[in-house]
Amino acid sequence: MEGEAQNFDGLLMPGLINTHAHTPMVLLRGAGEGLPVSTWLTDVMWPREGRLTADDVRLAMLAGGAELLANGITTSHEMYFHSEAVANAAAELGLRAVVTPPLLVADDLASFGGWPEQLEATVEQADRWRDHELISIGFGPHSAYAVPEKPLVRVVELAQKSGMHIQIHVAEGRQEGDALRERTGLSVPAYLDRLGMLDGQVLAAHGVWLSAEDIELFAARQTAVAHCPCSNSKHASGFAPVRALRSAGVAVGLGTDGPASHDRIDLFEEMRMALRLARLAADDAGAMGPRDVLTMATVEGARALGRLDLGRLEAGCRADMIHLDVSPLYPVVEESDLLTHLVYLGSPALVKDVWIEGHQVVENGYVLTIDVAQVRAEATARARSLAGL
């Protein structure tokens, strides 16, 4: 690790891992408040996102990425348009990012080209970033309802050929798979499995409306899930079967989703919400504990991304870690109190220092790699323009 050795009080722990994010949505933060996911996407988000430029996305990723770093998040699994701008901004920030360019077929997004061109660009991008220490590229087909079968099959073929991973939204809304089931007789996971997608490394985002058979299939195929409890709550999407997934052996990480679908980029809040929703869904105050959600935010999130070198402070792992001021977490009477307080009382305000790949990117709460105030001012101006103000 670079720099001179320093003495710290507090807690040194692995950096938090965000397994599903659309961080450049900071430019659209709060848009479409109160809408269900399907209406929110088609009537609010996609029309505005179709007008985004690469410069817009780079600036938005710098602004949102600075929040990730200051909030103790050292790895983020990103899906957003103009993905080269996303990757460049993450590299500039010193943020570890797994970038999956979204594949979508929608009239509002025609400016991004047809699906063959989108997939070709993803393969070329993966080649450009192949040896980078912080950035890796995967495929990001949006969902089974937004991407026709032919391009989904092509994603499977390219992923099998290249060994690249796939991130896809699955079973986020109650009616999401109704049309697919009516046409094919299959649930969304079973349909993706029929296409061969689940034979590769796949992370399914949300996974709210999964049946017992879907969970068994995910476990058999080693398909991971990104649980986004705050976003699911904001859109009233439902209670994800997190306990059943983890009991079946499915790796479940935590995700912030986008700051338009949930306004904060804060895994401390996601941990608390995941714990509370699991207890409410089970009607059992012992259904999930602080250790479970902290594991999901670190080592289990790393496993969900196929990165066994992240999420732990051990020999052989990457030097991604955060230093927390735990003095507000009192009183610590029993050994387990610190962990419990960290989950129930913890917030980004505790994060003092952050290192990624051994390089310090946050010091005493301040991001070192960019001028955050300037970036936020520019982002505010661009957000007003996108909103037509």
Image: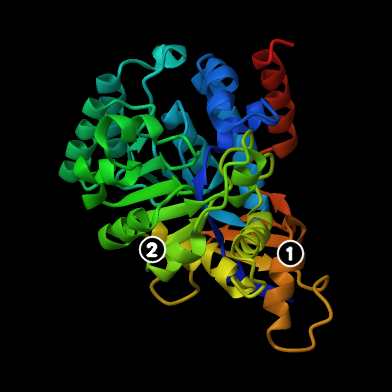
Q: Which image quadrant for residue 24?
A: top right
Residue 192 lies, with reference to residue 334, above or below; the image says: above
- The residue at 33%/38% (across/down) is 139
Residue drawn at (45%, 49%), measured in percent from left and top? 207
Q: Name the kind of residue labelled 1 in the image.
A: Gly
Mark 1, residues whose alpha carbon is within 10 Å: few (<14), some, or many (≥20)?
Answer: many
Q: Amino acid at mark 2?
A: Val
In the image, residue 312 above or below residue 73: below
Measured from the top left, where is residue 169 in percent x and y?
42, 40
Residue at figure coordinates x 66%, y 41% from the top left: 234
Q: Residue furthest toward the bottom?
A: 334
Marks 1 and 2 sit apart, C-alpha to C-alpha, by 27 Å
> Quadrant of the rendered structure where residue 370 is?
top right
Q: Which residue is mark 1?
A: 346
Q: Classify mark 1: helix, strand or loop.
A: loop
CB of mark 1 within 8 Å of CB of mark 2? Answer: no
Q: Nearer the viewer, residue 95 or 47?
A: 47
Secondary element at image label 2: loop
Q: Which residue is pictured at 79% across the width and 88% down the height?
A: 333
Q: Which numbered marker is on residue 250?
A: 2
Position of residue 353 measured from the top left corner of the image (x, y, whole percent): 67, 61
Q: In the rendered picture of this protein, how many numbered marks are placed on residues?
A: 2
Q: Which residue is at the front of the view, 330 or 131?
A: 330
Q: Nearer the viewer, mark 1 or mark 2?
A: 2
Q: Position of residue 79 (x, y in %)?
A: 45, 37
Residue situated in front as seen by the camera: 14 or 372: 14
Q: Position of residue 383 (x, y in %)?
A: 68, 21
Left or right of 298 on screen, residue 98: left
* Residue 369 in view (yes/no): no
The colour scheme used to paint the residues is rainbow
Q: Please indicate, yes or no, whether residue 248 appears anywhere in the rendered image.
A: yes
- Compared with 107, 328 (above or below) is below
